[in-house]
Amino acid sequence: MKLKNAYLLIAGLLIISSCKNDDDSNVESVPPRLLSEVTAEDDAEIIEFLKTHFYNKEEFDTPSEGFDFKIKFDTIAGENSTKQSLFESPNLITQTISVDSESLGRVDDDEIIDQKLYTLVVRQGIVEGKPTIGDNVILRYEGSFLDGSLFDASSNQPIPLNLSGVVRGFGNGMKNFQTGNGPIENGDGTISYEGYGIGAIFIPSGLGYFDSSTASGNIPTYSPLIFKIDAFEFEANTDFDEDGIPSFLEDLNNDGNLNNDNTNEESEAAVRAYVANYSDPDDDGDGILTIDEIKTDGVIKKDDEGNIIFPDTDGDGTPDHLDNDL
């Protein structure tokens, strides 16, 4: 079944909360800190957790009847002193992602700092291919702090979201997971998936909420986070704004972040708006829909490798759909 049909089955069941970026005035104010300072502390805390904790690997390697395939973390100590740490696990993936302090609202700090994102893939999904930062996905999640306390979770049923509509570390971590088969209607109003990816994402605050608060006000500023993930399904080449261009191709500066690519930012600022290209059907704001500006003789043309050939009518090196001065 296509992902959009699965969305219809899932719609209304759940609403993602703490994965989204929201503001709240109930969180205690903390003086601003430099991204570079916080980054070093976050990475040290995450590495300390990874080196002192293990997961229930044996249960995943030889699952018993009735095993729920849920990740459980515990401290390496006592009878568990010989367990392999998360840090030593061959299933741990480390990504380095640069973050500009301006993207976090720090326009005067002038810092670009590398962040370390850690993803543990406990079980890879059986379906070939992995989502991009612009794709729609269906998953189940549980969010906690490094001390194990839970701050948010979806219910037991799958939920849909777009990987550019969540905190940056969550979306980039999901790029490591293959998904499963489904949805399977269970006959009781619920659905399930088979052979899906399972893992966890360890996110520094620079790729999370940093000094912003959340809608529920339950995540303190500068908090590293853990998200346990069940990766059920994704829509390859999602075109979020239906402008004819897969969303991941609208990352114009190639930094793995779709939310800072906005061709007509200046004109939108005049009306106090900001719509990134991946969610804007008229990328250059010239009144002509992007899907019409990428067509040649009425059709979207592609090269031998399947890449869109973007028209450039005035030959100035800027494709028509990004050029409002034709």
Image (spheres, rainbow, N blue to C red):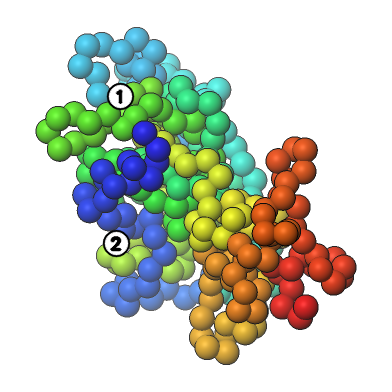
255 to the left or right of 270: right
Instruction: Give 121 or 270, whichever is nearer the viewer.
Output: 270
Q: Which mark is residue 144?
A: none
What residue is pinned by disc 1? Answer: 69
Q: Is residue 5 above or below residue 294?
A: above
Q: Is residue 311 above or below residue 71?
A: below
Q: Which mark is residue 218?
A: 2
User: Residue 234, image x and y in percent?
Assistant: 45, 39
Identified at 22% across, 39% down, the residue is 156
Most extreme residue toward the left, as rendered?
A: 188
Q: Circle 1 sits in a helix, a strand or a loop, which is it?
A: loop
Identified at 42% across, 73% down, the residue is 30
Amino acid, disc 2? Asn
Q: Quadrant of the C terminus?
A: bottom right
Q: Is residue 62 above or below residue 45?
A: above
In this view of the protein, can residue 37 be seen by the observer? no
Q: CA distance from mark 2 to mark 1?
A: 28 Å
User: Residue 217, image x and y in percent?
Assistant: 30, 66
Q: Circle 2 sits in a helix, a strand or a loop, which is it?
A: loop
Q: Residues within 10 Å of mark 2 (few under 14, many from 20)?
A: some
Q: Residues within 10 Å of mark 1 (few under 14, many from 20)?
A: some
Q: Is residue 95 above or below residue 283?
A: above
User: Residue 312, image x and y in percent?
Assistant: 80, 65
Q: Quadrant of the N terminus?
A: top left
